[in-house]
DNA sequence: TCAAAATACGTTATAATGTAACATATTTGA
DNA sequence: TCAAATATGTTACATTATAACGTATTTTGA
């Protein structure tokens, strides 16, 4: 029996992911499923080498390219996102939780990084993307992909700080 | 005579930078001035180790912390920006070229990275920041700093591709 | 003006992140 | 079933960044 077993909620999301892949004609292999599971179980963004440690619980001697290849696949499928400022990865809530039949494949998203608790919230706000495209169009720039990351305090941490 | 000498336009911008620092009560030392000069002379975002090579033309045996410390200072003063997706640095056109008396200190900016020619354009678009703050306010998130980077094609490269 | 404190820089070593290149295994499709 | 495509294993290394400690320079205040 290969692969760690995950919490039920995670398994559900993994099943969603598997369906999305199938719909694209790509395969969520055991390895990829396991890496995605490790990302999803983490309360926070996870670094590639933390994932590698997680993998090694199961597959001794696993090496960096194993993780990076799985991450590349998951990014291309739009199942995870990379938070550039943290060099770390989070599950795509849009693809995995929603009942978005058109999910999967990379999409524009925005990330709110709380410097208090380290949690990251994903937004899929049309207004931000629209403002970006608006601002770039008149100088003739064509946006293919955008990275939007904000650092600050989430509501809970702000309240804790003021108290 | 320490320090490389730069093109006249660069020296002018360095002088602007020096004035901004003085206004904040901080010092643009020879070393910091030299690193900033190397950033400004580059046509594109420069990596820390490229800057280190540049420094070594003048100061043999310079080591990474020398460059990183200078970069940290310049970032804090708002004289340069880091492009996260490229792990590279660019001069802040807003601070160095404009006659913005209030320049210096970090500010929200947006970067357009052309995957054709590698050039990066800085925007200081209020609408994008506004959209971001708008979208975050209703979930109680307080933005302290934002990173907005778009990849795509600049006008020149798009025209070249269509031709 | 001189000594203490603060700031900046030098130096060595190492941590953290990411990839190239090639071998092996597994899956897919004719 | 066999060839091609895809996925994974493995070794070695490249790139980016920082910790820790010592020295030099600058600033400040008595």
Image (spheres, coloured by chain):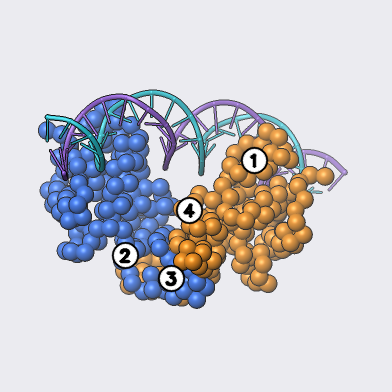
Chain colours: A blue, B orange, C purple, D cyan
The residue tagged 1 is B53
Position of residue A129 in the picture relative to residue A56 (left or right): right
Badge 3 local density, few (<14 within 10 Å), some, or many (20+)?
Answer: many
Labels 3, 4: one chain: no
Mark-to-mark CA distance, 2 and 4: 20 Å
* Mark 2 crowd level (few <14, some 14–19, many ≥20, 10 Å Cα): some
Provide the secondary structure element on which disc 3 rests.
Answer: helix
Q: Nearer the viewer, mark 3 or mark 2?
A: 3
Residue under the point 67% across and 50% down: B38
| Pick the front one: D3 or B117 | D3
Return the x and y of residue B53 as percentages of the image width and height: 64, 40
Q: Which residue is mark 2?
A: A123
Residues at marks 3 and 2, common chain?
yes
Question: Which numbered disc covers residue A132?
Answer: 3
Q: CA distance from mark 3 to mark 2?
A: 15 Å
Q: Chain of mark 3?
A: A
Describe the element under mark 1 as helix, strand or loop: helix
Residue A14 drawn above or below residue A135: above
Tell which circle, 3 or 2, labels the residue nearer the N-terminal end: 2
Instruction: Check disc 4 and report the residue beneath it.
Output: B84
**Which chain's residue wears label 2?**
A
**Which mark is nearer the camera, 2 or 4?**
4
Using the rendered image, report if marks 1 and 3 lie on a common chain. Answer: no
Q: Chain of mark 1?
A: B
Mark closest to the chain's N terminus, 4 or 1? 1
Is residue A156 among the parts visible in the rendering?
no
Label 2: element kind: strand
Q: Could you tell me residue B49's position as x and y percent?
A: 58, 42
Q: Secondary structure at mark 4?
A: helix
Query: Of circles 4 and 1, which is in front?
Result: 1
Q: In screen coordinates, is A100 left or right of B72?
A: left
């Amino acid at each position: 029996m290969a692969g760690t077993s995950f919490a039920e909620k995670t398994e559900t999301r993994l099943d969603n992911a598997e369906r999305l892949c199938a719909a694209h004609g790509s395969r969520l292999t055991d390895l990829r499923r396991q890496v995605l599971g490790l990302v999803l179980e983490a309360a926070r963004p996870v670094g590639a080498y933390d994932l590698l440690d997680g993998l090694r619980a199961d597959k001794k001697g696993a090496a960096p390219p194993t993780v990076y290849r799985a991450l590349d696949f998951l990014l291309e499928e739009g199942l995870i996102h990379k938070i550039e400022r943290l060099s770390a990865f989070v599950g795509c809530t849009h693809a995995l939780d929603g009942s978005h039949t058109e999910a999967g494949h990379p999409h524009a998203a925005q990330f709110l990084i709380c410097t208090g608790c380290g949690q990251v919230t994903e937004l899929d706000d049309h207004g931000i993307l629209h403002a970006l495209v608006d601002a770039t169009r008149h100088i003739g720039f064509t946006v293919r992909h955008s990275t939007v990351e904000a650092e600050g305090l989430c509501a809970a941490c702000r309240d804790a700080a003021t108290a």
